[in-house]
Structure formats: structure tokens, C-alpha cells
Amino acid sequence: MAERATENPLIPGSVISPIQPSPMISKSAGASRLLALFFASGISLWFAASGLRAAVILNEVMYHPPEDRDDLQFVELFNTGPTAVSLDGWTFTKGITATLAASTLPPGGFGLIVRNPEAIARHYGPGLTIVGQFTGRLKHGGERLELSDATGRPVDSVKFTDHQPWPQAPDGFGASLERICPNAPGDDPANWAASKLPEFPRASGTPGRSNSVFRSAPLPGVSSVEFQAVPPGQPMVVTARLRDAGGIQSAEIQYQILDTKPDTAIVAVPMVRTGGNEREGLYRAEVPPQPSGRLIRFRVHAINARGADRWSPDPEDPRSTYSSYSLVNTNTATIAMGHLLRLGDAGALGRTHFRSLDTAPVPNRGKAAYVLMPTNGGPVQVFDHLRVTHRSGGWKVRLFKDTAIDEMTTLNVIFEDSPRWVLAEPLSYEVLRRAGVASPKTDYVRLWVDGRPLGYFLIVEQPNKSFLRRAGRDDTGNVYKALWYGNGLVEQNEKKTRLQDGHADLVELIGGLDRLKGEAQWNWIRERMDVDQFCNYYAASQCIQNWDGYFNNYFVHHDLHPGGRWTIIPWDEDKTWGDYDDSSPRHDWYTMPLTYGMAGDKDPEAGLLKMKTQPWGVAPWWRPGGFFSAPMLANSQFRTRFLKRLQEVNTTVFTEATMLPVINALERRLESEVRFRAISTRQDPAFALREFHDNIDSFRRQLRERHAFIEKELPRELSRVR
């Protein structure tokens, strides 16, 4: 909609010139002006014809506040009628569970049903009229809300979702879902829009006052926008279905062509009606032929006979245009090819220091695009308006959840210091998965950034909410990331979800693990933790010699449902398969003790003078146990189960019969990519290939020698805990 001035998402920094709307009415303007406008629009006749006894409507919904702030959820009611309405005994007969207070909603009055009155007052300020409190929570994926009066008669309802044709900005970006026209149906997605999108994710909206999208009459409807990517040199056809009770006056598309530059001209092309009539018809326009390698962004603009207009997508949508790419996919390589176009998210290609990672807020409006060319010439896939930020060795690419790649919604696209790490990490996740540990997905892509070829990169899925859902975990639970730096439990476990709740559950859990001993400690563990899952993790970590995965480099997740348990999620599996800081260039370390990571495990050189260059001790591979591993692996009950599981994994998973085919397939898949990357980055291809094959051979040796070491040491370790 263009009836409010807003930044034009086609060109950053420019503004869409709005067609002048009807006067906006605020709560402070008084009910008389509001009612005058309503009656002039025929709203009183509409309510009389509808047979409803009350003119109270569902007006605004905050169903998915960002940062897991479900305490800020609310549903707003609005009395559009000429008389006050008693809400005594009113309730929701579908959706949330709430009975409204014995209060009266005056003409033009707003009333909120909230989840947490104190949180609402702190966030939005005092003075809001709260007429009820609901239990449970609004579903983030959408649901049906039905408001009924004291007799049980339905008054108004809406069934909203978190995907098109409903607005996207209310789904975790901070905008609320606002009704546009009070006298238009509540179940029509075209009659709802997002409130103004904040710059950064933060709960916003307009509780207690007129909606930012309020209009006295319905806007044109735009639906069924269809187009297909076309090869270079061919026009792209865009069709859309437009409707308006008073008739469509005119329609157009506005498009912009980009390569690696963010600022190019916007061109308008009229849409021609090819079917139907002015009240509902099919419209068509063409984007002229484009050269290869061009990103095409466009929007549909419809204006009705009254001069009211609508943009599709809505300007407040974080994905504010439709997008296509002019390219023929000729990819016959063994991995997909990807073009990352930052389009204003400029920055150095170098790595970012670890302490700056994930600390700055990420804006709601992304400027980057990612174009994916699957192997064997599949259709080109375009992911636009993405939020892309630097991370160590590459970029974090945030997709929209309805356009995930292989179910992944946030991609870590990385090639860190050592080429070996790009190989070891997916092999480690493969062992973990086969051992029964839900692990991030991985893949490879041959990458170009702003037109510059960089060679193959590793893609690692971020353990976010989509990952948790796929793993069958509570996506509303607490997630912590274990860090190697920081001071103490709280600083070394970064909270990633439900930030307002703090670390109380983690402090309680670790406090019990540290305080209790023996049988009491074991009861604490089995009552609160997924014992089998932790056994799987530590067993697989022993096989791959996960040097980093005991003290840090993992996530933990706490299911907050009644009886919910703690689980562990592997992460950053690069220093594995015989690798550690200052390890041998041959990575021929096969003897990490089976006591590694447990409380009581000591630096084998602890009796010698500590070297200042070794913070953990003289032995370069030794590290103390972590907050979880130290007490758990030292508990005899847990340790017995862990060692038995290690025996099973070492016999069935970490074997040449199981893992050699995986290693060999990795070698075949990436051999040509190693050569391409070396040429692209001006390195010696022969040297790069030798290094690559040496690393692959070291994985084969590690598999054989580590398997034999575990097989030899297990009987001794089992005898110690029996």
C-alpha cells in the first residue's frame, strides 16, 4: 500500500510518493470524528445488514513478537459502532482461552486482551485499556481466533497464517497484524497488513490507537502473481489477478534491474487486462529481455476508481519485491553453484574477529540476494532480500522460512583458515548423525561473491528454530552456545533464545551437577537430561577425537514443557580427526584418552612446570572438562552407559566398512573443486591437490588407528567403573 510514505525497497534511501489517503483518525482525535467518518462510509448500514448486535471487531494481533517475547502477545478489539458495548462475559470460543473483564468499550474505543499485562505496560507504556488476559500463547504459525459475546454468539473471527497471502512482517520481525478496513471481512487476507516494520526486530504495532494501515474503504486486491525465470534475451511475463468492488482504474508493474550495483533506475510498465472485467480480472505485463547475470526485482501496483491503491508485495514486508534472475543453468559440476550478491551490504571479504560475531543487531530489511544453480542443469533458484552478515571465514545467510534450502533457513557459508577443516567438519557430523545425534546439515557450493569467483565453500546449517523443529525439539525452549572465552558459567554460555528469561535454568542444572555426588547426582542427571542423547554425543566425539567439543563448541537445548529434558547439539566440528591446536602436520594423533573431558582427568604433564604458552598445561592436546562433560562423564552410572555406547558406535559406525565409502565419495566429489578453487584464488593447483589428498589419506589413517585404540582401551575403562 502506498497511502503512507515509506522507503522504496527497490532503491534504498528513496521514498514511495503516496497517493493522499482519507484522513487518519487517532484515538486522541475523539470518537465523534471517527464515527462521522464511519457513518459517511456506510458502516452503520453494513452492521445493520449483517445482523450483528455489536460492532466490536478483531482489529490488531501481535502473535509472534521477536526475540521470543511471547509475553508481548496481544489481541486488540475496536468498537466501530455508535454506542458503548459491555464486554461482560465475552470470551474467545476459538484460539486463545480468555474471558473478558466486566468492562465497557466506548464508541471508537480500543481494548486489549494480553498475555502479560506487566510486560505490555513496560514495553508500550501506561494508559492502555486492558479488557482481558489469556492463557497459553498465540501460535507463531497462525490460528483461528473467534470472539463471542456473553450468549455464546460469534461476533467476529479471523483465521491468519504466517505465510502468503498473509503479511510476513508480523512473523517475528516486530510488526503487528493490522486490519485495514473495519467494514471489510476479517477472514480476507487482503484486508490485513503489517504495521510499520521497525528497523531492527522489536515488538511494535499500534495497540490502543488507530491502525497505521486504517482505511475507511477496502483497498484493491492483488493475488495470484505469477512469473517464470527466462533465459537471457527473452521477455519475462508477469500476470496477476486484481479485484475491487468499485473497479480497477489502472495497474502497472515497477521493475529494477541489478547486477552488483544497488542503485539503478526503476521502470514502470502498464498492466493490460487480458480476462475478466474491471471488478475482477487477469492482468499482464512484460519485463523486457535482459542480459545474462541480472537480478530482476518488481512489484505490482493497482489503483481503484476512488484513487486508493495497493502494492504487492506490501512495502512493509521484509521481502518487499518479487525477484527473478536472468541466467541459463549450465552447471554440470558435482556441487551446486551459488552467486551471493550483497547489493549494499558491502564489506571486506576477510574474516571477522570472533568476539564481534553475532553481537550487532541484524536489520529487518536485507539487501542481499543468493542465486543457486543446482547440479545437472536444474531450475535456477533466487533468494532475495536476505540478511547477510560476516562471520569467521565467510558469511551467515538468513533465508526466509518459506524458501528454505533443503530445510535449512540459516546457512553458514565458510572456508576458514585450514582447507582440512572444510573436509573434517561434514565427516564429523556424519559420524554424529549415524550415532543418533541430531546434527546440522552440511553441503558444498562453488561460490561467487559480487561476481568474484572464490571456489568451493562449506555450508553448515545454523542450529535455529527450524533445526529444532526438524529434530523434534521444542522450538520455544532455551538454547545456549558454549564458548571457550568468558568468565564463569553465565559468560561462557551465550543465551541464544528467550533472552529476557536469563540463565536461571542453566544455573540450576549445573549447580545440581556440581553439588551432588554418586546416586543423587545420577538421579539428577536422568531426571533432567536426555541420557541416551548425551551418551551418543560423547561416544561419537571420542571416535572423531572432538578436541573442542567437551569444553566448548556445542549448543545445549532445554525443552521447557513439563518433563522436558536437556539435549546437546554438536557445533564447529573442525578440530577433529586428529587435529588440535599445534597438532602434527600429519594429524597422526590417535590416542586421546577415553577419560578426556571428565572431572578428575588431569594434564599428563601436570607435575612439570607449566608453560605460559599453554593455558591448559604442558601437554598441547589436554583441556579440562566442560560444565556438562566434567561431572557427567565422571558419574559412574552415566559413565558405564557412555562406555557401552562407545563400544557400539566403534563397532557399527566408526569402522572402515561404514566410513571409508563416505570418505572416498568426498574425495571424488571435491577433487575438481580443489583445482577450480586454486585457480580462482591464484594458488598452485598441484600443491592444493597434494594437500587435499594428504588430508583425505589422514582421515583414512585416523579411522583405522583411532578405531583400534578405542577397541584396545575400552575393556580397561569398563573394568574401572564396574
Image (cartoon, helix red, strand yellow):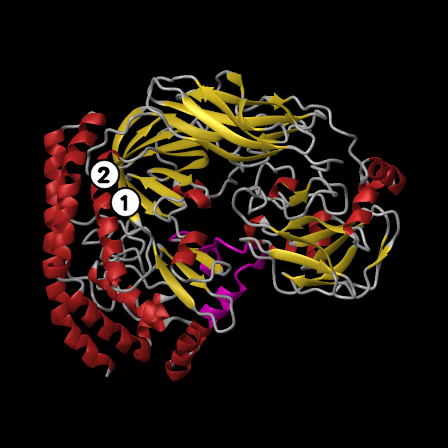
Please, is residue 195 above or below residue 55 in the view? above
Q: Amino acid at mark 2?
A: Ile
Identify the mark at residue 335; answer none if there is no mark.
2
Please, is residue 293 above or below residue 164 in the view? above
Q: Amino acid at mark 1?
A: Asp
Task: Give left or right: position of 190 versus 322.
Answer: right
Sort mark 2 into few (<14), some (14-19) or many (20+) by Cα contacts within 10 Å. Answer: some
Asked whether 647 or 261 is in front, the reply is 261
Q: Which residues are magenta?
A: 484-511
Sequence-first disc among 2 and 1: 2
- The residue wearing badge 1 is 443
Q: Percent x, y for residue 379?
A: 31, 34
Q: Percent x, y for residue 526?
A: 39, 77
In what element is the residue under mark 2? loop
Q: Percent x, y for residue 472?
A: 40, 62
**Quarter of the figure that contains the N terminus:** top right
Asked whether 619 or 463 is in front, the reply is 463
Please, is residue 288 above or below residue 718 in the view? above
Asked if the residue under mark 1 is in contact with the one under mark 2, i.e. CB atoms within 8 Å, the reply is yes
Q: Percent x, y for residue 19?
A: 69, 23
Asked whether 493 or 401 is in front, the reply is 401
Q: Quadrant of residue 383?
A: top left
Q: What residue lies at 58% left-to-right and 56% top-to-bottom?
A: 143
Is residue 11 in sight in this rendering? no
**Quarter of the figure that contains the C terminus:** bottom left
